[in-house]
Amino acid sequence: MHKQERRYLLRPLIIPVILVGIAWTVWWLVANAAVEFGVRPQTLKGLAGIFFSPFIHDPKDVSHLINNSLPLLFLGWALFYFYRELSWKVLAWIWFLSGFWVWIAVQDESVHIGASGIVYGLASFLFFSGVIRRQRNLMGLTLIVSFFYGGMVWGVFPYDLRISWQSHLFGGIAGLILAIVYRKKGWQREKYAWEDEVVTENFSQLNERHEAVLHGKIKDPNEIDEDPPFTINYEFVSKE
């Protein structure tokens, strides 16, 4: 792999690595105190959590941070690699919407922390963008996302009240909406010439023409003409 290709491949990792690095630094240094800056629904103090909560994780369970770090690195890389011109907009909107909707919709006095809302938003955006655009490379990415993170769908249901399923749900919805909004921007599916052809015959007319070709009444338009027959004339000249 050439140096330029390696740089092109690794550059999209810069932002995800920085975000994950900040989350680990916060957890290592001020994990307990940072919980106060989580999303507290429908409180003025909780508004700050919309911006800070993705960097805050359970101070007593490092697995919470690990489970968010790995998918955030991969999905973040995929976003910045395949959707370079949209990456910042998509990330910013998912970040804001997933937190704001939790703040405005949840009715209890819970505190919501962690980057799982962003993870669900990125997975949703990448998955539905690949489906909508029907581009081969993006469809491959969609299959990878669905294979590794297909089980994430259960996270949008309240099966465990210790988990912020609302963040998962709203993050997923934000990703779907953004995939629809930006469906005509960024990497697009290749369009073939035959897709622009105008169909002037209905089904019955096509069927009649097909029957006529089968019975030899008309010439098959797709048949390749053979080279016309040719004649070689020889002329003998006597040697005298």
Image: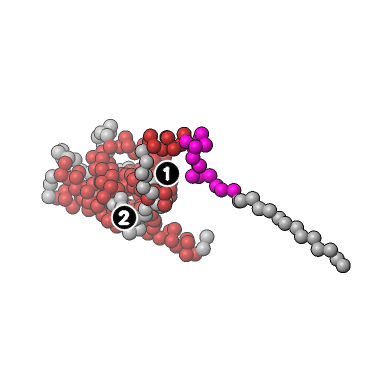
Q: Residue at x 33, y 59 (%)?
A: 85
Q: Does the magenta segment cover residue 220?
A: yes
Q: Which residue is mark 1?
A: 144
Residue farthest bottom in this picture: 240
Q: Look at the magenta stretch and give its main secondary structure.
A: loop
Q: Residue 50: percent from the left, percent from the top?
A: 21, 50
Residue 168, position in %: x, y?
A: 27, 41
* CA distance separating discs 2 and 1: 22 Å
Residue at 47% from the left image edge and 61% from the top image edge:
6
Q: Mark yes or no: residue 164 visible.
A: no
Q: Badge 2 local density, few (<14 within 10 Å), some, or many (20+)?
A: few
Query: What numbered label is drawn on residue 185?
Result: 2
Q: Residue at x 56, y 48 (%)?
A: 225
Magenta span includes 163: no
User: Residue at position x 30%, y 48% from top?
Assistant: 179
Question: Disc 2 residue type?
Answer: Lys
Residue 214 percent across, percent down from the top left: 51, 35
The disc label shown at residue 234, or none: none
Q: Quadrant of residue 207?
A: top left
Would residue 83 appear left or right of 92 to someone viewing this image?
A: right
> What range of the chain is rendered magenta?
212-226
Give the amino acid type for the residue marked by disc 1 in the picture.
Ile
Q: Position of residue 210 (x, y in %)?
A: 46, 36
Q: Work out whether 125 lies above or below 157.
A: below
Q: Nearer the viewer, mark 2 or mark 1?
A: 2
Q: Secondary structure at mark 1?
A: helix
- The residue furthest top is 159
